[in-house]
Image (cartoon, rainbow, N blue to C red):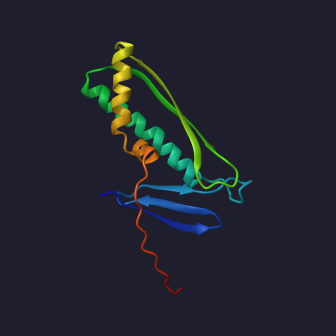
């Protein structure tokens, strides 16, 4: 089980932690009313997508004995003004390796099928909510 927690600090600033002791400060841009001391939560979600794609592709390549020389996954996510949802996400994968192009393309298809964050983007994941109001 993966556990995470976000605690509000002030204005739009928050600290997001996992149970292993890692933390990321999230904030809004200055034009969005924040102090811009960290990525927005939505930016962090897009960053997680690129990080997961790199991690899974590298793993697929290791399992396939493909020696990577360079790997970069960049994302561009579109969100329409006033919308709560991303309207489009485009990934640009740049890879250099000691392997044929067809083998690298197959490795990317395996990545798409096994990248947990990409699967969250592609399929709706049920989210349960336990909402509680406390004093203080």
Location of residue 18 with respect to 75 vertically, above or below: below
Image quarter (top left, top right, bottom left or bottom right) of the N terminus: bottom left
Residue nearer the viewer, 63 or 105: 105
Dividing the picture into quarters, in which one does residue 111 lie? top left
Residue 34 image position (x, y, % from top left): 68, 59
Identified at 37% across, 44% down, the residue is: 116
Identified at 53% across, 49% down, the residue is: 44
Location of residue 34 with respect to 93 vertically, above or below: below
Residue nearer the viewer, 112 or 21: 112
Residue 26 image position (x, y, % from top left): 57, 56
Identified at 40% across, 66% down, the residue is: 128
Q: How many marks?
A: 0
Residue 69 image position (x, y, % from top left): 40, 19
Outermost residue toward the right in this view: 31
Residue 88 image position (x, y, % from top left): 57, 41
Location of residue 10 with respect to 121 vertically, above or below: below
Identified at 46% across, 76% down, the residue is: 131
Apparent side of residue 118 relative to residue 28 in the rendered image (left or right): left
């Amino acid at each position: 089980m993966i556990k995470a927690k976000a605690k509000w600090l002030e204005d739009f600033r928050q600290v997001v932690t996992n149970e292993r002791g890692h933390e990321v400060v999230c904030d809004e841009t200055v034009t969005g009313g924040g102090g811009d001391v960290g990525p927005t939560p939505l930016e962090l979600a897009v960053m997680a997508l690129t990080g997961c794609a790199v991690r899974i592709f590298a793993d697929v390549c290791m399992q396939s004995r493909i020696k990577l020389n360079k790997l970069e996954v960049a994302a561009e996510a579109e969100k329409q003004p006033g919308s709560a949802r991303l309207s489009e996400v485009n990934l640009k994968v740049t890879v250099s390796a000691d392997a044929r192009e067809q083998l690298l393309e197959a490795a990317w298809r395996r990545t798409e099928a096994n990248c947990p964050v990409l699967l969250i983007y592609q399929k709706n994941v049920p989210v349960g909510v336990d909402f509680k109001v406390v004093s203080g």
